[in-house]
Image (cartoon, rainbow, N blue to C red):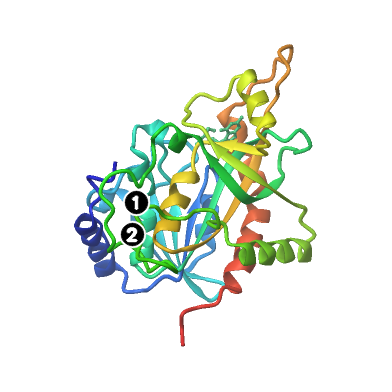
Amino acid sequence: TNRFYTYERVQEIVAFIQNIVPAKPEVAIICGSGLGGLAELVVDKVVIPYADIPNFPRSTVAGHRSNLVFGILNGISIVCMQGRFHPYEGYTTAACAFPVRVMQMLGAHTLIVTCAAGGVNKSYRVGDIMLIKDHINFPSMAGNNPLIGHNDERFGKKISFCLRPRFPPVGHAYDRQYASQMKQIAAKHNIELREGVYCALGGPCYETIAEINLLRVLGIDAVGMSIVHEVTLGAHCGLRMLGLALITNKCLSEYDSTIEAVHEDVIRISELKANELQQLILDFVGGVKTNKT
Ligand SMILES: Nc1nc2ncn(CCNC(CO)CO)c2c(=O)[nH]1
């Protein structure tokens, strides 16, 4: 539950960061496995290792660096999480996702989430980039949601009909306008963009064949172990969001197949396709409407 990351404790972390970086980032970016290279493109960069931030968790997964990177990306002030946290590391979903609240309180109005994912949709190929249209949050269906516990209405911005509701709507978490902007950017760069439904499992083991067949029956296109709790908190604090999943493994569902998903492939494919993903994000960030009056 979010008992530990209270509003006061998050405020302390925000104050600590603002002491180091006076900038007010407009766009927050969470880099998935092997996708941390985007932060290298940031100019006027200020890097704060997670280890230096009081009460911040540590990334413990290969392919995840552990830095909060501030600076300018294509003219826009951003904050980038080089490395994210996952429930399979032993963190609660609230601990995995609370940095979204920190980045919103630092000034972000937009959140871009990226991840590596397994291709459940049979037509998907390794290396495809999928625009996340919606998600299925299996951990939340099992009672594991970052909003469980006290609902502090001081987090985030007013959502249309009421203040940070106890029961926030997440039906439109993935901003449709951002999605169409991203499609235009991909077309401009001749990058074929899939669009589909992402689902999160707890991990750390990959899926069984029966589970992959179940996900397919449910109309799921890609499977991973992150994203959904970050997007849930982003919806609660009123962020406009865009999600991109890089397909690093094809989920095979024949019992006679001998191929297994391996993390080494996740890193290798992520690094192979990092430039394409970075180009999409760079162009998208450059076009984000800023708060500057
Ligand atoms: N079949 C399958 N292929 C995948 N490739 C990346 N991920 C996302 C999870 N990434 C983990 C382990 O690689 C590291 O966070 C997955 C997944 O969950 N399932």
* Tag 2 near tag 1, CB within 8 Å: yes
Please indicate whether residue 17 sits to the left or right of residue 158 in the image: left
Query: Residue 186's spot in the image, x, y percent?
Result: 73, 61
Label 1 element class? helix
| Residue ranking furthest to the bottom | 293
Q: Residue flagged by tag 1: what amino acid is it?
A: Phe
Query: Residue 117's spot in the image, x, y percent?
Result: 60, 39
- Please report the residue visible at 55 percent of the width from the left and 44 percent of the height from the top: 34
| Residue ranking furthest to the front | 161
Label 2 element class? helix
Who is closer to the viewer here, 128 or 141? 141
- Decide: is 181 above or below 260: below
- Please report the residue visible at 21 percent of the width from the left and 55 percent of the height from the top: 9
Query: Residue 217's spot in the image, x, y percent?
Result: 69, 29
Please indicate whether residue 13 sits to the left or right of residue 210 in the image: left
For label 1, the residue is 98
Q: Is mark 1 within 8 Å of ligand 1?
A: no
Q: Which mark is residue 102?
A: 2
On the rendering, which quadrant does ligand 1 occupy? top right
- Please report the residue visible at 72 percent of the width from the left and 45 percent of the height from the top: 128
Dot 2 alpha-carbon crowd within 10 angstroms: few under 14, some 14 to 19, many 20 or more:
many
Q: Residue flagged by tag 2: what amino acid is it?
A: Val
Q: Which mark is residue 119?
A: none
Q: Quadrant of residue 249?
A: top right
- Please report the residue visible at 34 percent of the width from the left and 54 percent of the height from the top: 166
Q: CA distance from mark 2 to mark 1?
A: 7 Å
Please indicate whether residue 170 sits to the left or right of residue 57 in the image: right
- Decide: is 24 above or below 55: below
- Decide: is 131 above or below 255: below
Who is closer to the viewer here, 17 or 170? 170
Query: Residue 279's spot in the image, x, y percent?
Result: 65, 61
- Decide: is 257 above or below 32: above
